[in-house]
């Protein structure tokens, strides 16, 4: 089934005591820009360095320090915009978002409110085998990250680590097009996959490289259609924002809880207060953090330290020319060129490393065989041993060697599995191991033919039985296998025995 044949999935519903409700979700994803240095300083961005080791005078907001825009970070954000089929704004501008926080030495965050770098785009997310959701992207702006306050190292003191201060972020804002907790997780997964293919964000959620603020509201049947027709957001009810989520599972749990909480309030005659909430995985509940601020609370104004950002069409074109093949295109190509099923192509393109591995191994028209081997044997073993494909003990070159012996029937598939295991444990080349273990399958017709003839001559009574019992063929094949210690090619042997005994096959 091609992408265009897939339908939009039904929204997730919640049955209240009085009526049925639907869920609406929009997401703001903060993706750390993959770059060696920060957005406005030369300080490194490495994760896990000693606290406060990655701090320049600019990041520490020393008097008189001025931000200098990192052009590589801008290129990365443009690349991301192009990957999400978005419009790149030739003119954008930086604004100061003013607020106090101990881990924000400047007293403001440099962000882009009025003129973001990237405009409207979209992400297509497969939900079920026959359904997909296209989620609109409203904008992507670039901004600095804040530092980290550490409250759990000492009972009486808090600590500040400014390593993350000033690291470049892309804030990817979706439209409220997500209609279930399941879709929310699928959207984030797809977004992460695209960012990783583009190499603009490492997508590491544990390290906080990808964090989502999730906006949830509940509506009555029909309200969403009115929103679609009028584009009037007031049809979507009052939303609550669940802040800083960095786990797909917790995002799903938080949305499910939050939607039920809102339904209970509304059915009780209450009103939803627009606010920021936090999800507590231990209790499975969201709790109020603070009432939601509006943009005007932050007294945004254009940053006087930075000129407006002008992007030439030439710069956009150069980045577009170098865009890599993205997951959806790669998946379609694998289906078309190698005859893979949609499922197999999906599994093999989950990350670029797996897709590259497959393409290195695949030989001409044996795509299905190679896909099966990678998905079942290789991924199975990697999972079992907790390894990533980048550290696979069987390299793509060695797997290709194993499978080319199999394709040429020089080894049986049972032998290929044994060989795979030997390569995995010894890291020797498949060719050396075949010699060392005498694994080459006998396909020499003359040799097998001679064995078959001898066996028939030595066992005339067995040979005569074949007219009443065709299974006797199997007995002769077994004898040939025995004589060759299992190395005779079973197909060739079977054919030769049948021919000699005059059995039609
Ligand atoms: Mn932000």
Image: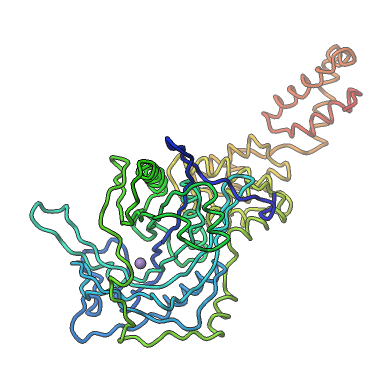
Q: What's the image's color scheme?
A: rainbow
Q: Nearer the viewer, residue 495 or 115?
A: 115
- Judge left or right: residue 49 versus residue 415: left
Quarter of the rendered image showing ligand 1: bottom left
Residue 466 rendering spot, x and y as whole percentages:
87, 16
Residue 502 rendering spot, x and y as whole percentages:
91, 24
Residue 412 rendering spot, x and y as whole percentages:
68, 37
Q: Nearer the viewer, residue 423 or 63?
A: 63
Q: Can residue 426 be seen at all in this image of the molecule? A: yes
Question: Where is 312 relative to 147, above or below?
Answer: below
Q: Nearer the viewer, residue 382 or 31?
A: 31
Residue appearing at x 55%, y 56% in the figure: 226
Residue that sits furthest to the front in the current view:
269
- Judge left or right: residue 445 versus residue 391: right
Residue 290 falls in which quadrant of the image? Answer: bottom left
Residue 330 falls in which quadrant of the image? Answer: bottom right
Residue 153 rendering spot, x and y as whole percentages:
15, 53
Question: Where is 347 relative to 293, above or below?
Answer: above
Residue appearing at x 38%, y 76% in the figure: 112
Q: How many marks?
A: 0
Q: Can residue 398 be seen at all in this image of the molecule? A: no
Quadrant the C terminus occupies: top right
Residue 450 falls in which quadrant of the image? Answer: top right
């Amino acid at each position: 089934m091609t992408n265009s044949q897939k339908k939009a999935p039904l929204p997730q519903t919640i049955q209240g005591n009085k009526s049925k409700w639907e869920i609406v979700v929009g997401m703001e994803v903060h993706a750390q820009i993959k770059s060696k240095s920060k957005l406005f300083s030369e300080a490194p961005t490495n994760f896990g360095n000693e606290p406060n080791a990655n701090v320049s005078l600019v990041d520490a907001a020393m008097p008189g320090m001025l931000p200098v825009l990192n052009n590589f970070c801008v290129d990365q954000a443009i690349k991301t915009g192009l990957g999400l089929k978005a419009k790149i704004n030739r003119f954008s501008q930086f604004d100061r978002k003013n607020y106090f926080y101990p881990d924000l030495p400047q007293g403001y965050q440099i962000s882009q409110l009025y003129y973001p770098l990237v405009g409207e785009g979209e992400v297509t997310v497969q939900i079920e085998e026959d359904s997909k959701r296209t989620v609109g992207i409203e904008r992507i702006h670039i901004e600095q990250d804040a530092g980290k306050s550490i409250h759990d190292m000492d009972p009486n003191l808090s600590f500040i680590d400014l390593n993350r201060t000033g690291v470049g972020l892309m804030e990817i804002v979706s439209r409220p097009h997500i209609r279930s907790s399941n879709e929310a997780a699928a959207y984030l997964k797809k977004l992460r996959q695209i960012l990783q293919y583009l190499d603009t964000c490492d997508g590491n959620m544990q390290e906080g490289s990808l964090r989502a603020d999730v906006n949830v509201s509940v509506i009555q049947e029909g309200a969403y259609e009115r929103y679609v027709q009028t584009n009037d957001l007031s049809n979507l009810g009052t939303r609550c924002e669940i802040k800083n989520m960095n786990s797909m599972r917790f995002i799903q749990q938080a949305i499910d809880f939050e939607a039920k909480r809102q339904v209970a309030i509304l059915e009780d005659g209450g009103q939803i207060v627009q606010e920021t909430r936090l999800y507590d995985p231990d209790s499975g509940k969201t709790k109020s953090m603070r009432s939601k601020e509006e943009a005007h609370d932050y007294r945004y104004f254009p940053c006087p330290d930075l000129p407006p950002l002008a992007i030439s069409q030439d710069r956009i074109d150069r980045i577009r020319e170098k865009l890599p093949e993205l997951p959806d295109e790669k998946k379609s190509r694998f289906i078309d060129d190698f005859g893979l099923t949609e499922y197999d192509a999906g599994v093999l393109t989950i990350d670029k490393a797996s897709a590259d591995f497959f393409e290195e191994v695949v030989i001409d028209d044996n795509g299905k065989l190679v896909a099966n081997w990678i998905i079942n044997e290789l991924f199975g073993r990697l999972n079992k041993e907790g390894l990533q494909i980048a550290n696979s003990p069987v390299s793509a070159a060695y797997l290709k060697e194993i499978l080319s012996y199999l394709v040429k029937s020089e080894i049986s598939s049972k032998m290929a599995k044994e060989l795979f295991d030997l390569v995995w444990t010894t890291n020797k080349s498949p060719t050396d191991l075949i010699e060392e273990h005498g694994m080459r399958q006998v396909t020499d017709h003359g040799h097998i033919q001679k064995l078959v003839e001898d066996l028939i001559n030595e066992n005339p009574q067995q040979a005569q039985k074949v007219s009443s019992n065709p299974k006797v063929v199997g007995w002769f094949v077994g004898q040939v296998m025995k004589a060759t210690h299992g190395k005779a090619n079973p197909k060739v042997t079977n054919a030769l025995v049948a021919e000699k005994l005059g059995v039609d096959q």
